[in-house]
Image (cartoon, rainbow, N blue to C red):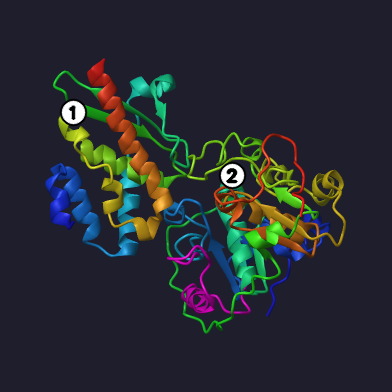
């Protein structure tokens, strides 16, 4: 059973309008059977302070990452997580969160690795819901466990590894971090702690399009025509381009991956989740510093 | 090293906070952390009007500012502010503010640097997020040292 898409005029212009819902739409559909609302935040306690009525919490770190290896959970654990959260394979999942939906987009991308079909983002996330004075509750739902099938994660289509990036030179690479991180002055976003990445800079040839350029003042994605200018025209992207986006650990680039894939309709976009924390510490990988994109290494 | 060993070097209030966390299961630890977050006192007015006196804890993922006072009896007073939308950080700040309350300079300087990692929160909160609390403790000690040297 599929729940009707949000038919807002703004969304209709996007390549896949059914991937976004507005706060109005969500308000109207709060109690719709088959809909599960998921909150995914940077701050692990924010959900507990108040969340959209009926929403369950999925934490990017403690729920979606493998506790030992730097990787995502496997199919079995994902199935167990979905079951515990009351999500069936055919549920419509709407995800929202703090920090402009970084972690919400990241969770949506992980859901996509497991092929969960109907997963949508709340345009504007927590900030917009809050700014509009909408209701929060601290009541934590106790969903009925579901029979979620064990589906193996399929990384091939939308996830890039370091080896893939090394083979990617000559194709579009988008670094979505801040200019300070791109040029190599910082290894984390302004306002964030400097972490132990050993080198600063960017992957040679990467364009720098900070994720925030895709976002309007109220936290929602910019309209189709503006996104088209930002990515397609400014970077000269072609329809069938093979694109890789990265940031520091893959959360901000999940936000850009969403825009490129679902809003602009590019079919071959991968998120390099190893991102700068891997590349900037890896041995013998090429790095460019400064504002110039730099040249692809000679083979 | 067991908890008892660790507690030997820990001021009673901090030891008690740790016992409190370790006595409960993971999900309840988050609830307890949230209670601490809600109890973080507002800044005294003399700082509320003087943001210039506050030091930014850049290791935290949200804007956290702190200031240390040492009074004439060598008692340390820690003031911290963190935004409402960052309850985890507020919780950490509140634990330290509560646990260090009324301690002398020497007692504060003797608090083990790794105290934040011993609260049993690494699984529930992730080490990345605990880093801010370690930094807050480190900055508190540094300010105490600077005040004593001045």
Instruction: Give the residue displayed 63% in from the left and 79% down from the top.
Output: A90
- Tell me if mark 2 has few (under 14), some (14-19) or many (20+) residues whose alpha carbon lies within 10 angstroms of its own: few
Quarter of the image holding residue A142? bottom left
How far apart are the alpha carbons under marks 1 and 2?
A: 44 Å
Residue A21 visible, this orientation? no
Please tell me which residue lies in front, A231 or B1: B1
B8 with respect to A256 (left or right): left
In this rendering, do the residues under marks 1 and 2 share a single chain? no
- Magenta span covers which residues? A65-92
Q: Which residue is mark 2?
A: A131
Mark 2 falls on what kind of element? helix
Mark 1 falls on what kind of element? helix
Does residue A84 show up magenta in the picture?
A: yes
Does residue A13 show up magenta in the picture?
A: no
Q: Which residue is mark 1?
A: B105
* Residue situated furthest top in the rendering: B150
| C-beta proximity under 8 Å, tags 1 and 2 | no
Residue A238 visible, this orientation? yes
Instruction: Give the residue displayed 59% in from the left and 44% down from the top.
Output: A131
């Amino acid at each position: 059973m599929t729940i009707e898409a949000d038919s807002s005029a703004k969304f209709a212009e996007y390549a896949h309008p059914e991937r976004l819902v507005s706060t109005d739409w969500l308000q109207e559909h709060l109690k719709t059977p088959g809909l599960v609302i998921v909150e995914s935040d940077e701050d692990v306690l924010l959900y507990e302070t108040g969340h959209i009525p009926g929403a369950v919490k999925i934490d990017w770190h403690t729920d979606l990452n493998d506790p030992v290896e730097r990787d995502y959970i496997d199919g079995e654990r994902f199935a167990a997580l979905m079951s515990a959260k009351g999500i069936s394979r055919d549920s419509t999942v709407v995800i929202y969160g703090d920090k402009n939906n970084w972690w919400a987009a990241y969770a949506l991308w992980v859901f996509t690795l497991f092929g969960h079909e109907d997963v949508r983002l709340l345009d504007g996330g927590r900030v917009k819901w809050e700014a509009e004075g909408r209701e929060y509750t601290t009541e934590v739902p106790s969903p009925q466990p579901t029979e979620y099938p064990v589906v193996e994660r399929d990384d091939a289509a939308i996830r890039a590894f370091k080896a893939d990036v090394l083979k990617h030179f000559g194709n579009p690479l988008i670094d979505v971090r801040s200019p300070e991180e791109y040029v190599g002055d910082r290894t984390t976003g302004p306002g964030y702690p400097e972490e132990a990445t050993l080198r600063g800079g960017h992957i040679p040839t990467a364009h720098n399009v900070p994720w925030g350029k895709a976002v309007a003042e109220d936290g929602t994605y910019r309209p189709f025509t503006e996104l088209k200018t930002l990515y397609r025209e400014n970077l000269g992207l072609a329809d069938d381009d093979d694109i890789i986006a990265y940031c520091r650990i893959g959360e901000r680039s999940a936000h850009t991956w969403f825009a490129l894939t679902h809003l602009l309709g590019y079919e071959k976009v991968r998120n390099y989740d190893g991102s700068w924390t891997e590349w900037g510490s890896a041995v013998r990988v090429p790095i460019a510093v400064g504002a110039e994109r730099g040249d692809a290494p000679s083979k | 090293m067991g908890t008892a060993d660790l507690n030997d070097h820990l001021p009673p209030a901090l030891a008690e906070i740790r016992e409190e966390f370790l006595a409960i299961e993971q999900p309840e630890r988050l609830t307890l952390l949230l209670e601490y977050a809600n109890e973080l006192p507002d800044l005294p007015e003399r700082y509320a009007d003087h943001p210039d006196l506050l030091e930014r804890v850049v290791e935290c993922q949200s804007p956290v500012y702190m200031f240390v006072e040492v009074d004439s009896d060598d008692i340390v007073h820690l003031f911290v502010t963190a935004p409402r939308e960052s309850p985890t950080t507020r919780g950490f700040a509140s634990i330290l503010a509560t646990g260090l309350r009324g301690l002398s300079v020497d007692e504060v300087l003797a608090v083990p640097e790794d105290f934040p990692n011993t609260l049993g929160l690494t699984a529930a909160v992730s080490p990345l997020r605990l880093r801010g609390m370690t930094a807050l403790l480190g900055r508190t000690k540094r300010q105490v040292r600077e005040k004593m040297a001045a």
